[in-house]
Amino acid sequence: MKETPHTHLKIKICVSGAAETGHCSADALEKAKELGSEIARMGAILVNGATTGFPYWAAIGAKEANGFTIGISPASSEREHIETFNLPVDYMDMIVYTGFGYAGRNLLLTRSSDAVIVGCGRIGTLNEFTVAFEDGKPIGVLTGTGGTTDQIQEIVKISNRAKDNPNIVFENDPKKLLGKLLAIIKQYKVVKV
C-alpha cells in the first residue's frame, strides 16, 4: 500500500468480534493479535468498538506493530466508557465517544471503515456483519475462530442474499484474509493509497 501523509485517506479496517471470549476457539485471540499486526504492517488503521476480547487483542497486535488504532465507544464520555460500560482505554490512539449504546455504535463503527473483518463472535458481531452486508462493504470472515462467525457462511447461504454482497471473503489465516480483502478494498477507494 502506498504511504500517504494524510491519515484520513489511509484504509480503515474495522475488527469486529466478541468482547467475552469463553466460547472462542483456543487460538482465536492469537489470531486476533496477528490480524492487528498485519493491519498495521500494511499501513492501514485498525478501527474497533473500544472494547475487550477479540477486538482488544487485535488492537494489541496493531499497537505492538506500531499501528494506529481508533475505538468507537458506545458511551457518551470517558467516565461512562470506564465506569458504566467497564471498557478499556489502552491500546487506542483515539476513542470516539458516541453516546449511542451498542446498536448505534455498531452502525458508526462499520460505516466509518473501508472494510469489516469479523472474528470469534456473538450477537453483536453478527449485527456488525449484517450492517456491513446491507451497506455492501467488503467483509472478511476469519473462519475457525468460533461463535457466530463460524455460522456466517451458512447464514448468507440460507438467506438467499449472497448475490447482494459479493464482497465477502472467508479465510482462516489472518494474513491471507487481509490480502484477499485488500484486493477488494482497492477497487472501491476513490483516493488510491
Image (tube, helix red, strand yellow):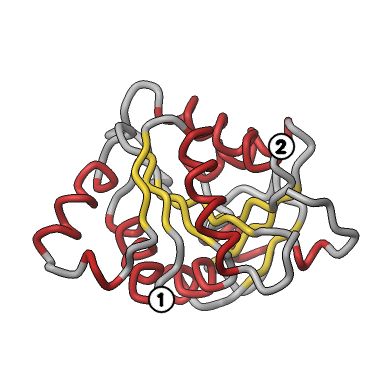
Residue at left 54%, top 58%? 49
Nearer the observer, 165 or 31: 165
Q: Where is residue 169 in the image (x, y as percent from the top left)?
A: 37, 49
Nearer the observer, 18 or 142: 142
Q: What residue type is labelled 2?
A: Arg
Q: Position of residue 138 (x, y in %)?
A: 45, 61
Quarter of the picture holding the C terminus:
bottom right
Q: Where is residue 147 in the image (x, y as percent from the top left)?
A: 25, 41
- Lower position in the chain sequence, tag 1 or tag 2: 2
Left or right: 10 with respect to 118? right
Left or right: 41 with respect to 183? right
Cβ atoms at labels 1 and 2 below 8 Å apart: no
Distance (Cα) linking label 1 and label 2: 27 Å
Q: Which amino acid does label 1 sit on?
A: Asp
- Can you see residue 86? no
Structural crowding at the residue carrying mark 1, measured as other residues with C-alpha within 10 Å and reported as few (<14), some (14–19) or many (≥20): few
The answer to whether 43 is drawn above or below residue 133 in the figure is above
Q: Residue furthest right?
A: 5
Image mark count: 2
Residue at left 54%, top 52%? 183
Residue on which the image places disc 2: 41
- What element does badge 1 sit on? loop
Residue at left 40%, top 68%? 132
- Place residue 106 in its image quadrant: bottom left
- What element does badge 2 sit on? helix
Residue on which the image places disc 1: 135
